[in-house]
Image (cartoon, rainbow, N blue to C red):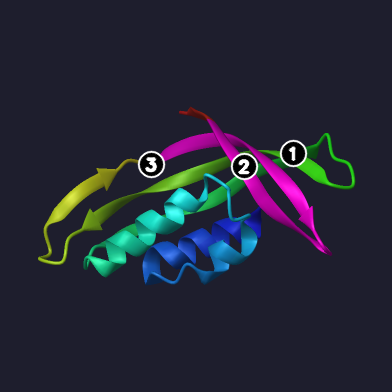
């Protein structure tokens, strides 16, 4: 999970989503964030500040094909800045949690599904 959040932080500051793509299954709804990042950067938007940090990750209910991770993470506050320098969105600092379903792909695991559960 830490690798996924590191790739998310990298993508949100650089626009390079290749790390996120490599860690997620093609049909995962989490791919929506990849599209949003690409759309933002192609339109000249960027994120300032922020980042995501894993606070806790617990693996459970796994077998040879699937695993589940209960993850709690901190979303640091950030601003979305348009190409003209104006702030179009402000995201407040929050603690969130999600249930993440992983699928085995050869010798590694891919994120198959993310179900956000709460925001504090």
Can you tell which quarter of the image residue 93 is in?
A: top left
Highlighted magenta segment, given as a residue range: 93-116
Q: Which mark is residue 93?
A: 3
Percent position (x, y) of residue 78? 32, 52
The reply to whether the C-beta atoms of the residues labelled 2 and 1 are less than 8 Å apart is no
Q: Residue under circle 1?
A: 68
> Which label sits in the foreground, 2 or 1?
2
Mark 2 or mark 1: which comes first in sequence?
Answer: 1
Q: Is residue 108 magenta?
A: yes
Between the C-alphas of marks 3 and 1, the distance is: 26 Å
- How many residues crowd around disc 3 within 10 Å: few (fewer than 14), some, or many (20 or more)? some
Between the C-alphas of marks 3 and 2, the distance is: 24 Å
**For this view, does 105 lie left or right of residue 25?**
right
Q: Secondary structure at mark 1?
A: strand
Q: Is residue 40 above or below residue 65?
A: below
Q: Residue under circle 2?
A: 113
Q: Secondary structure at mark 2?
A: strand
Q: Secondary structure at mark 3?
A: loop
Q: Is residue 97 above or below residue 41?
A: above
Residue for point 22% across, 47% down: 89
């Amino acid at each position: 999970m830490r690798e996924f959040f590191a790739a998310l932080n990298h993508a949100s500051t650089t626009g390079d989503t290749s790390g996120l793509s490599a860690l997620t299954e093609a049909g995962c709804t989490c791919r929506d964030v990849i599209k949003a990042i690409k759309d933002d950067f192609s339109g000249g938007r960027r994120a300032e500040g922020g980042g995501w940090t894993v606070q806790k990750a617990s693996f459970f209910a796994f077998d040879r094909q699937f695993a589940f991770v209960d993850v709690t993470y901190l979303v640091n506050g950030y601003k979305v800045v348009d190409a003209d320098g104006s702030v179009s969105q402000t995201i407040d600092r929050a603690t969130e949690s999600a249930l993440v379903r992983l699928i085995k792909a050869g010798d590694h695991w891919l994120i198959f599904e993310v179900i956000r559960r709460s925001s504090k």
